[in-house]
Amino acid sequence: MSDEREQHPSETFTFTQLAQDGAARRGRIDMPRGSIRTPAFMPVGTAGTVKAMYLDQVRDLGADIILGNTYHLMLRPGAERVAKLGGLHEFARWPHPILTDSGGFQVMSLSGLRKITEEGVTFQSHVDGAKHFMSPERSIEIQGLLGSDIQMQLDECIALPAGEKEIARAMELSLRWAERCKAAFGDQPGKAMFGIVQGGDHKELRVQSAKALAAMDLKGYAIGGLAVGEPQDVMFDMIETVMPFLPQTKPRYLMGVGTPDDILGSVQRGVDMFDCVMPTRAGRHGLAFTRHGRINLKNARHAEDHRPLDATSDCPATRDYSRAYLHHLVRAGEPLAGMLLTWNNLAYYQQLMAGIRDAITGGRLAAFAAETRAEWVKGDLPPIG
């Protein structure tokens, strides 16, 4: 099965499983604005832009969908203004699928003073200090004004470590909010609302959350509250705990993950969708992700290294610029450094996802994972000879 981008636009939101290898599955999500090949990595376009990239570039690298952030867009330029300007797709010139998060994570982590009640959360903007109120219904309303294709329920994402009682309280509140988000979203055949499994690092709470969300018969399911500082083995354990209780016929999205190794391990456990700021943020800070692992272009060892990051890559940023030049740009603080390294990083992430999809189809994901991990250890080694 080829990994060429094929469009199967559908008036309804549908998920089709095309192949399986162990717990990993290859599939395709079809909706009116196009198709999403899974497992998929969604570049993060926080404020309507994937930082340091043209969206045409992002598309050309292989992205079928990008993510927008409800919290940031509601503060600037405002959801009602985006709607007046034709919605986020037209505003940002991205006519393909967009997923918006609910804004809950940013409310909990970025805003100033905040107060959580059964009705919602009152919070202070990190931009100008203004007070706002977000209920589950308002979160869905904002995402509707933005015009996104996949919308996330409002949930309470608490920081770990936390006590079991506090984790249970937040998980149960999130379930009640999921019901309200489902009612507010209503019947939109060509779009989807995903529920979010919470429960921290407690297996029983995760199972309770997953079972309750599955009973709501939503169009997709996310696993939230992970990749927030817990060890990787804890994250994988929570994924393995939850998976048996999520419907096999619906897509599964691990929020905010992550490193290439996190993604590879999560795919092997049945996850279909990922997003993370890591490739773009790392690019702006001099770190390249490559087939050979991570390369820190700040290191002086690259100052006279004429080799590109990877001579075999199809990405011009990866193939055509020397490590010495990239090192110079990083050390000089030139904006081009972030542009080229972000381009490289997103290219690598999409190449990794394409390789994963092909490996699942060929029934050789375990071998692909072993080969890929073996290459990563070569990352920041000095030149040979």
Image (cartoon, rainbow, N blue to C red):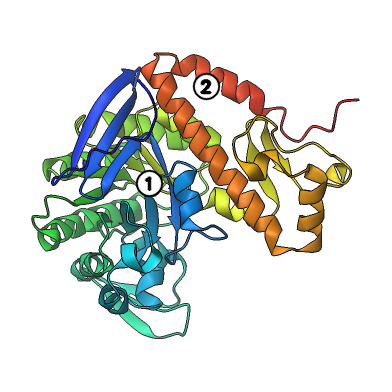
Residue at image point 45% right, 26% down? 356
- What residue sits right under mark 2 in the picture? 369
Residue 37 drawn at (x, y percent): 34, 36
The amino acid sitting under disc 1 is Gly
Q: Residue 186, located in which quarter of the rendered image? A: bottom left
Q: Indicate the quadrant containing the C terminus: top left, top right, bottom left or bottom right.
A: top right
Q: Nearer the viewer, residue 99 or 244?
A: 99
* Gap between marks 2 and 1 measured at Cα: 27 Å
Which mark lies nearer to you, 2 or 1?
2
Horizontal side, residue 288 vs residue 142: left or right: right
Residue 301 drawn at (x, y percent): 86, 42
Local SS, label 1 = loop
Q: Is residue 51 above or below residue 17?
A: below
Local SS, label 2 = helix
The numbered mark, 2 or 1, whose residue comes first in the sequence reads 1
Whether residue 231 is visible here, answered yes or no, is no
The amino acid sitting under disc 2 is Ala
Q: Is residue 41 above or below residue 337?
A: above
Callout 1 crowding tier (Cα within 10 Å): few <14, some 14–19, many ≥20? many
Callout 2 crowding tier (Cα within 10 Å): few <14, some 14–19, many ≥20? some
Residue at image point 31% right, 61% down? 102
Q: Nearer the viewer, residue 48 or 196?
A: 48
- What residue sits right under mark 1 in the picture? 200
Q: Nearer the viewer, residue 195 or 63?
A: 63
Q: Indicate the quadrant containing the N terminus: top left, top right, bottom left or bottom right.
A: top left
Residue 251 drawn at (x, y percent): 26, 37
